[in-house]
Amino acid sequence: MLLPVSQVASLVNSLNLTWVDKVYLNEIPKEEPDNTDSTVMLLQETDSSPAYLANSTFKGVAMGV
């Protein structure tokens, strides 16, 4: 199973957005902030918490990007 950020990156890449030059997962490379000629998109995980509680245990994980 792909991580949620990888799934969203695949979706964004399949949209062929003309205004996005590069898509990065989790962090932007150190050399990229100096580049002012391209538009980059950073995708990060924003939520990773237990979900679907039943019988005092969780049955899944809520994840957000």
Image (tube, rainbow, N blue to C red):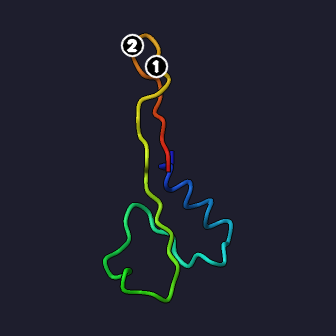
Question: Which residue in the structure is indicated by mark 1?
Answer: 53
Distance between mark 2 and mark 1 Cα atoms: 6 Å
- Residue at 47% across, 60% down: 43
Q: Residue at x 68, y 66 (%)?
A: 15
The reply, left or right, for residue 52 in relation to residue 14 is: left
- SS at mark 1 in the image: strand
Quick one: which residue is furthest to the bottom in this view? 37
Most extreme residue toward the left, as rendered?
A: 30
Mark 1: give few (<14), some (14-19) or many (20+) Cα within 10 Å: few
User: For residue 12, what is the image quadrant?
Assistant: bottom right
- Between residues 64 and 13, which one lies in front from this camera angle? 64
* Residue 26 point in image, percent of width and height: 39, 60
Q: Is residue 30 left or right of residue 10?
A: left
In percent of width and height, residue 31 lies at: 33, 82
Relative to 49, does residue 40 appear above or below in the rendering?
below
The reply to whether callout 2 and callout 1 are in contact (CB within 8 Å) is yes
Q: Nearer the viewer, residue 38 or 57?
A: 38
Q: Position of residue 14 (x, y in %)?
A: 66, 65
Which residue is at 39% across, 13% downward?
Answer: 56
In the image, residue 36 above or below residue 10: below
User: Looking at numbered disc 2 in the image, what kind of residue is underneath it?
Assistant: Ser
Q: Three-letter amino acid code at disc 1?
A: Leu
Going by the picture, which residue comes out furthest to the top?
55
Q: Position of residue 41 (x, y in %)?
A: 51, 69
Local SS, label 2: loop
Mark 2 — residue?
56
Q: Is residue 4 above or below residue 48?
A: below
Image check: 38 left or right of 35?
A: right
